[in-house]
Amino acid sequence: MSSLRHFISLVDWAPEEIEALILDAARMKAEWKAGVRPTPLAGKTLGMIFQKPSLRTRVSFEMAMRHLGGDAIYLSPQEVGLGQRESVADVTRVLSRYVDAIMARVFAHSILEEMARYATVPVINGLSDDEHPCQALGDMLTVYEKKGRLRGLKLAFVGDGNNVATALLYICAMLGMDFAIATPPGYMLKEAVIERGKAFAARSGSRLLFTHDPAEAVREADIIYTDVWASMGQEAEAEVRRRVFPPYQVNAALVAKARPDVIVMHCLPAHRGEEITDEVADGPHSVIFDQAENRLHAQKALLVRLLAG
């Protein structure tokens, strides 16, 4: 049986595997801060395909490979023309002969699934319209650092039921963390996503709450999380969303309804003054820049698992 693993969706991995990645990431971060510089991926190269622009995904993956002794190649939308200039299957088969793994940041999740069918090297989801699993790994590393545990905490997501919210539901439900989400009517997570989250929660003991009331969602929350109201590819909806989402802003009044030691998270980029205020983003509860840093270390753990075993 082939040992080839992909990281397309969190649901393809067992909860204990996800937890092990987070613990590995914490250890690798501590080693790096202490000046320990192992190079388990010396001679390895990551090919990075981008349909969507990125700051954190590109730099964190590129620096992760450098930290581990490897290299990374950035491929822009113009260079590849994924599915337009050249078919997804052909791009994948060619890259598989050049590099040791492929990270792709795409619009349609089906592109990643097609890449996984044709790849002979690991494929990593750097973001799709359906899910952002690498973000969730870095987020859980951050929660673990700040709270010392994951199980039994409560994360409240306030805003759009998008790809980030999907990944957070999955990872919380897998790891025994309670998850609440408050969205405007019509912007809730997809029903299939909710059902899958419920299945994980039934096994782990997580409690789930799906509501339209932000105050209800953040009650007794240890973590409040938000994201932009309109993601890339939703620009045409931006004006409508700006009228719908203001009651879902994470501001000081909403933060005050959570636990006194609540931490506030945002995957960035932030539209300050919309989904989050400057007062909160730069305030004492915010850990948003620790989150951004932890993308690097979580992805190091993932890359070592996929490429070094």
Image (cartoon, rainbow, N blue to C red):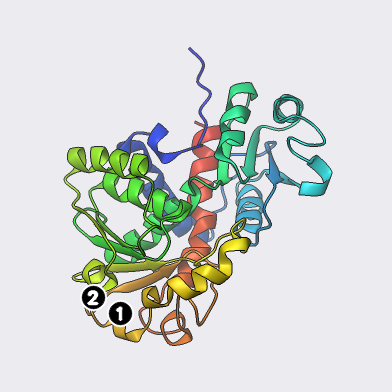
Horizontally, residue 286 falls left or right of residue 2, namely: left
Disc 1 residue type (three-letter): Val
Relative to 149, does residue 84 appear above or below in the rendering? above
Q: Residue furthest top?
A: 1
Identify which residue, 43 or 19, lies in the foreground.
19
Residue name at image x 23 percent, y 61 percent: 154
Check residue 255 in the rendering and tell me which mark sits there, or answer none.
1
Residue name at image x 50 percent, y 82 percent: 273
Picture quadrant of residue 122: top right
Report if residue 34 is visible in the image. Answer: no
The image shows residue 23 at horizontal and vertical percentages of 36, 49
Relative to 158, does residue 99 appear above or below in the rendering? above
The image shows residue 215 at horizontal and vertical percentages of 24, 74
Relative to 160, does residue 298 appear above or below in the rendering? above
Crowding around mark 1 (Cα neighbors within 10 Å: few <14, some 14 to 19, many 20+) is many
Identify which residue, 285 or 208, lies in the foreground.
208
Please state the total of marks drawn on the protein image: 2
The image shows residue 299 at horizontal and vertical percentages of 52, 49
Do the numbered discs 1 and 2 sit on residues whose CB atoms are within 8 Å?
Answer: yes
- Element marked by disc 1: helix
User: What residue is pinned by disc 2?
Assistant: 258
Picture quadrant of residue 188: bottom left
